[in-house]
Amino acid sequence: MRVRLFIKMIVLYFCIVISTLTMLGVLLSFLINNYFLFNKQMEMITKASNISNLVKPYLIDNRYPGTVVSLLNGAEKNLGTEIWIIDPTGRTVAAASKAREHEGDFIDARDIKAMNSGKTSVRKGKSKLFDETALWVVTPIEHNNKIIGGTIMFSPIIGITQTTEKVRNLFIYSALVSTIFATIVVHFMAKYVTSPLREINKLSKHLAKGDFSKRVRVPQNDEIGDLAEAFNHMASQIEKQEKLRRDFVADVSHELRSPLSNIQGFIEAMIDRKDKTPEDRARYLNIIHKETIRLSRLVNELLYLSRIESGPPETGTAPVNLINVIEHSIQKFKPSAEEKNQNIQLANLPDDEIFVNGNYDRLEQVITNLLDNANRYSPINSDITITVEKSDDTVVVLVKDMGEGIPAEELPLIWERFYKVDKARNRQHGGTGLGLAIVRQIIESHCGTVKVDSKIGNGTQIGFVLPLYNPA
C-alpha cells in the first residue's frame, strides 16, 4: 500500500521527538546522579578528614574507646552518617553506640591497602557489612609518618537514588506531555504542508483530463505558496497553449480549405466543360495556379515556423552588415512595390556600417516579411519608410506603412500565428497570417526583441531591436 506523505511526516517527526527526549532523559538522569554523588563524596571526604583529626589524639594515647564512642555519637548526630574507627589491620575498634556490634569486624582488603598507603578511598556499592547500597570513605590517620588507623564513614545513597528517581519521573511526565503537544503541532504542520500538495495533485489530474479552468487556492506566503503559484502559472500556460493549438488547427483548416475549395471548384468546372472558350480556360488555369502558389506558400511557411519554434537555435551565425541586408531586401522587393506604385525610402541611415551577429538569410527574410506586410496594407501611390537607429550597443530597424493602422488593444496579438486584424481584408490581400510570427521567432533566436507602434488613420510601424556585434 502506498504510504501517504502525511503519515510519513507524522511518523518521522514523532520518532525525532521520542529519540531526542529519550537521549535527553538518559543524559539528564546520568548527570544529575553523578552530580549528587560527586557532591556527596566531596562532603564525606571533608567530614572524614575532620573526624580523623578529632579522634587522632585518642588513638595516639590509646585512650579508652568509650571516649571515642561519645565523640562518634555526637558526630553521627550532626553529620547524618555512620562513623567507625579502624586500626591499621582494618579491624573496627570503635563505632557509634548503635553500631557497636560491628566492632571487631574487618573492612574490605582493598580499602585496607589504600589506607595503609596513605590514600583516601571512596567506594560505592553494597558492603559486606551492609545490605543497602551505600557510599563510604576510608581516610587514613597518620602520626609520625606512620599509619596508626583510619576513619571509615558510611552514608546510604537511597536519598540520592530517590531524588534521581523523582527527577526521572518528572522528566518522563514532562516528555509525555511534550510528545503529545509535539504530535498535535506536527499533525497541523503536516496538514499545512500536505493539504496544498493534495489539492495540486487533484487539480493536476483535472489538467490531464483537459479541464484547465481550476486553480490552486493556497494563501501561504512561503515555498508552498510559490509552488502553488507556479502550478497556477503552468496551468494558465497550458490552457493558453491548448487554446493556441485549437485555434491553430482551426486556422490552418480554414486557410487550407479556401485555396483547396477554389482549386476543386475550377477543376470541376473544367471537367464539366464550362470553360467553353480559350479565354475561360486560361482564366480558370490562372486562378488554379495562383491558389496553388498560395497553398504552397502557406505550407512552406507553416513548416518553417514549426522548425524554428521546436528545433535547435539558429546555426551558422556570423557578423552580418545589417545595412547590406536591408539594401538587398529592398532591391528584391522593388518589383512588388512598383505594382502598387509604392516608394520605399530609407530614413536616418547611419554613415558607417552596422554589424550584428546572426544569419544573413534569416535576417533578410525578416526584412522581406516586414516589407511584404507594409506593401499589402499600404495604399497605392504611398510611401514605405525604413528607419535605422543605432545606439551604443543596439540597433533598431522600423518599417512604416501608410495603412489604416491597428487598434491599440490588438497590437500585442499581431505576432500570433494566423492573427488578422481584418480577416476579410487580409484574405483579400493574399496574406497567410504567418509573416509576423516568423519575424518574431527569427528575431528572438538572434537575442533580439520585436516592437510595434500604430495609430488609427496614421499607419503602422513594425520592427525589431538587435544587439550590435561585439568582437570581444
Image: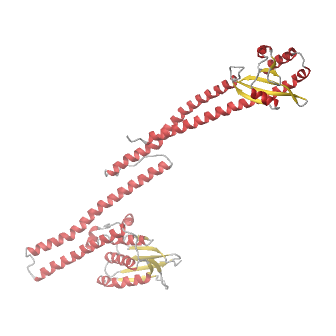
Identify the image quadrant of residue 60.
top right
- Asked whether, in this view, residue 143 is left or right of residue 109, the answer is right
Residue 205 versus residue 53: which sits nearer the camera?
A: 53
- Asked whether, in this view, residue 433 is left or right of residue 8, the answer is left
280 shown above or below 96: below
Q: Position of residue 446 (x, y in %)?
A: 43, 73
Q: Position of residue 75 (x, y in %)?
A: 82, 20
How is the rendered protein coloured? secondary structure
Q: Residue at x 65, y 33 (%)?
A: 30
Residue 347 versus residue 199: which sits nearer the camera?
A: 199
Identify the image quadrant of residue 53.
top right
Identify the image quadrant of residue 409.
bottom left
Q: Residue at x 17, y 73 (%)?
A: 263
Q: Position of residue 146 (x, y in %)?
A: 88, 29
227 shown above or below 169: below
- Asked whether, in this view, residue 384 is left or right of residue 95, the answer is left
In the picture, the quarter occupied by the N terminus is top left
Let me know if residue 350 appears in the view: yes
Let me know if residue 414 appears in the view: no
Residue 381 versus residue 239: which sits nearer the camera?
A: 239
Q: Position of residue 419 (x, y in %)?
A: 32, 66
